[in-house]
Image (cartoon, grey):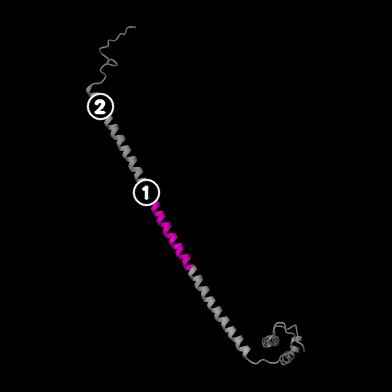
Amino acid sequence: VESTQSTGDLPVFGRIDVNPERVKEMRKRAKEVMNHQIKTAEQKKLFKDTEKQEAVKFEVDMLSRAKTETRDDCYRKYLIRKSVQENLEKSWTTQHQLKMSRDHAELTHRRKPGLILLDQWDRIAAFGPMRQNTKDVINARNAATIRELQIFWKESRYLAGARLMV
């Protein structure tokens, strides 16, 4: 197959394809691509570095916040424990003083001469009519009766194992 066109007008494939202008253009384009790739790599590196710095800053802030919250929580718990301890100590002190006053009152009562058991029983028997009225338990006479009974048992000096024979 013969070609109708002459080969002198068209560039021949494989023969000197590049002329100096085209070489300059190719080099210029290659440099531009290289510069673009370098800039892109630098931007990616800068972005990763800033992202990493932000993550580190966030973690440091979070840790410092957690540390202050933990410290504040420990301080609040300490204050609660301290107030509970102080309240318990005050309560124990007042209870001890109350017990000591009761013991002192009991001791002074024991040192007083008591009535004979029969005399005490006669005194209680005088309140017999008041005790028979069971409907009005809360009135003043019955309250007096209850007080008298309490005094009776307090002054009786009951000993365990003792029998009362009247």
Looking at the rendered structure, the kind of residue marked 2 is Glu
Q: Main secondary structure of the magenta part?
A: helix
Q: What's the magenta region?
A: 57-80
Task: State whether residue 93 is above or below residue 30.
Answer: below
| Residue on which the image places disc 2 | 25
Q: Secondary structure at mark 1?
A: helix
| Residue on which the image places disc 1 | 54
Foreground disc of the pair 1, 2: 1
Task: State whether residue 148 is above or below residue 93.
Answer: below
Q: Nearer the viewer, residue 18 or 103?
A: 103
Residue placed at 55% from the left, 81% from the top? 97
Lower position in the chain sequence, tag 1 or tag 2: 2
Instruction: Give the spatial CA distance, label 1 vs label 2.
Output: 43 Å
Looking at the rendered structure, the kind of residue marked 1 is Glu
Task: State whether residue 111 is above or below residue 19.
Answer: below
Quadrant position of the N terminus in the picture: top left
Quadrant position of the C terminus in the picture: bottom right
Q: Secondary structure at mark 2?
A: helix
Q: Position of residue 18 (x, y in %)?
A: 25, 21
